[in-house]
Image: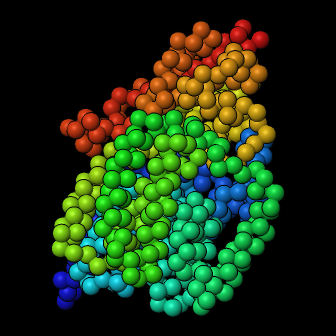
């Protein structure tokens, strides 16, 4: 018969599964989040060609610089299982995110007793930033690798620990960069670790260069597109920074005098680095502050596992876990959402039937859906993976136009860009306030689909997600006489 400890661990793992996979079934298999249509498209290219592409055909052919392991994994699983990538993608990242919970439990067992390790695992299972990231972010693989990497280094498995850390480079650049200062300051400089670390890092860098080519670096810009994302999140970012920063401050102040183990020092510096990136939002969006809560959540969970916790601090951790659970419950089922619903796809079919002579402007996620499902990829004016620059001179202006940011010469932009149609859905209006486009004298509404999307927690209106309630997908067309 299973022990009480085993039963508790199984219950925690079931909570992790529920929070990560529940919304996937709720939304009927539509990939949740912004980036998944991009991942579908690139994975299909790799699956169908058998090679990692040198260029992304979107927007005239940008260098393909995205970390390749996630796309290779999706392509491989599709080949082995025979299932379409569109079917696999809603489940793969939540599953990887789930695997991080038992990995964090194993990490905690190295430094804590069995009961406290269960608390750490529950904290990881419920952390709302981690559950939100579980649908859309290949960083989930890094969240699995980083605790295992530090665990291996603590166990003197030096090469394996260095290798696991270096592999993060092929899953997500930002997760790798945020964790690099801590790794260099705490572990990598040690005489017994340095050769292993340098070899693993050099091997990864050479593999990256062979995969992408050094010229790809010339096309990469960490600042490209960040203003568009920051504008999308402007209503929540200040609250996100203050709330996350306050929780972080409490943990850092408490842990400051308990950094005896190298792992504790590592996670402390990791949290400090991520915290600096978080508050940088007050100055610039370049450090992608909106990404930091998920990095901080991982770091704080592992930091708590690495230090000795007093009775009062444990009570604080219990309170944080309760807060995390209810935040995860609401965010998983009413804030995390498919950027495009199944009904929105009818608008894409309508556009394809029109076979427009001009270009189509829409949110980058919608653009990726058009590229996946139609032959209109050469007509789209935006696309995801902002960091890879393009020779298309209208991309930044198109993002400004969608973001309701005034252009210096709007009529000239519309004419010279060749924009014929604008495709909008619920997210455009609720995030960027695009209803004013209906009043533009040079635009006509030529398509509208109104529908109702029920909310799981409809009795709590303040928690309604972007795709709850009465929604509309619409298409606006630029008047011929204006374009000529």
| Residue that protrudes farthest toward the front in the picture | 257
Question: Which of these two is toward me, 364 or 396?
Answer: 396
**In the image: residue 256, left or right of residue 444:** left
For the point 66% across and 63% down, the residue is: 68
Q: Is residue 37 above or below residue 19?
A: above
Quadrant where the image shows the C terminus: top right
Q: Residue 448's spot in the image, x, y percent?
A: 49, 22
For the point 69% across and 82% down, the residue is: 199
Residue 9 in view: no
Instruction: Indicate how the structure is coloured in the image.
Output: rainbow
Q: Residue 153's spot in the image, x, y percent?
A: 51, 85
For the point 55% across and 74% down, the residue is: 185
Quarter of the rendering containing residue 65? bottom right
Question: Which of these two is toward me, 162 or 454?
Answer: 162
Question: Which of these two is toward me, 409 or 212?
Answer: 409
**In the image: residue 109, left or right of residue 439:** left
Quarter of the rendering containing residue 410? top right
Residue 168 in view: yes
Q: Residue 364's spot in the image, x, y percent?
A: 60, 39
Q: Is residue 131 above or below residue 389?
A: below
């Amino acid at each position: 018969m299973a022990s009480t400890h085993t039963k508790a661990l199984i219950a925690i793992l079931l909570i992790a599964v529920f929070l990560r996979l529940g919304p996937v079934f709720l939304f009927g298999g539509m990939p949740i989040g912004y980036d998944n249509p991009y991942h579908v498209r690139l994975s299909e290219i790799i699956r169908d060609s058998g090679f990692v592409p040198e260029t992304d055909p979107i927007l005239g052919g940008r260098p393909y610089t995205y970390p390749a392991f996630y796309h290779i994994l999706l392509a491989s699983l599709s080949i082995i299982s025979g299932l379409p990538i569109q079917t696999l993608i809603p489940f793969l990242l939540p599953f990887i995110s789930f695997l991080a919970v038992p990995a964090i439990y194993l990490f905690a067992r190295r430094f804590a007793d069995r009961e406290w390790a269960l608390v750490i695992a529950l904290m990881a299972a419920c952390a709302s930033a981690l559950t939100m990231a579980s649908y859309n972010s290949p960083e989930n693989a890094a969240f699995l690798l980083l605790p295992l990497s530090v665990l291996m280094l603590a166990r003197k498995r030096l090469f394996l620990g260095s290798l696991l850390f270096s592999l993060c480079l092929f899953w997500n650049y930002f997760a790798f960069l945020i964790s690099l200062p801590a790794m260099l300051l705490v572990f990598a400089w040690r005489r017994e670790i340095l050769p292993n670390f340098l070899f693993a890092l050099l091997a990864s860098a050479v593999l990256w260069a062979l995969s992408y080519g050094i010229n790809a670096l010339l096309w990469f810009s960490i600042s490209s597109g960040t203003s568009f994302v920051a504008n999308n999140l402007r209503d929540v970012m200040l609250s996100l920074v203050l709330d996350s920063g306050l929780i972080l401050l409490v943990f850092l102040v408490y842990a400051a005098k308990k950094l005896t183990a190298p792992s504790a020092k590592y996670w402390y510096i990791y949290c400090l680095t991520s915290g600096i990136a978080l508050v940088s939002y007050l100055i610039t969006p370049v450090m992608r502050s909106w990404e930091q809560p998920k990095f901080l959540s991982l770091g704080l969970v592992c930091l708590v596992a690495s230090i000795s916790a007093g009775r009062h601090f444990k009570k604080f951790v219990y309170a944080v876990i309760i807060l995390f659970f209810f935040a995860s419950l609401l965010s998983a089922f009413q804030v995390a959402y498919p950027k495009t619903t199944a009904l929105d796809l009818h608008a894409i079919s309508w556009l394809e039937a029109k076979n427009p002579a001009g270009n189509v402007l829409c949110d980058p996620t919608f653009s990726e859906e058009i590229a996946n499902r139609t032959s209109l990829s050469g007509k789209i004016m935006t696309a995801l993976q902002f960091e890879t620059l393009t020779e298309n001179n209208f991309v930044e202006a198109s993002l400004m136009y969608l973001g309701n940011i005034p252009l210096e010469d709007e009529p000239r932009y519309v004419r010279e860009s060749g924009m014929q149609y604008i495709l909008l859905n619920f997210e455009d209006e609720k995030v960027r306030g695009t209803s004013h486009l209906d009043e533009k004298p040079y635009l006509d509404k030529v398509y509208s689909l109104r529908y109702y999307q029920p909310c799981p927690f409809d009795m709590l209106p303040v928690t309604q997600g972007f795709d709850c309630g009465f929604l509309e997908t619409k298409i606006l067309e630029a008047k011929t006489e204006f374009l000529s």
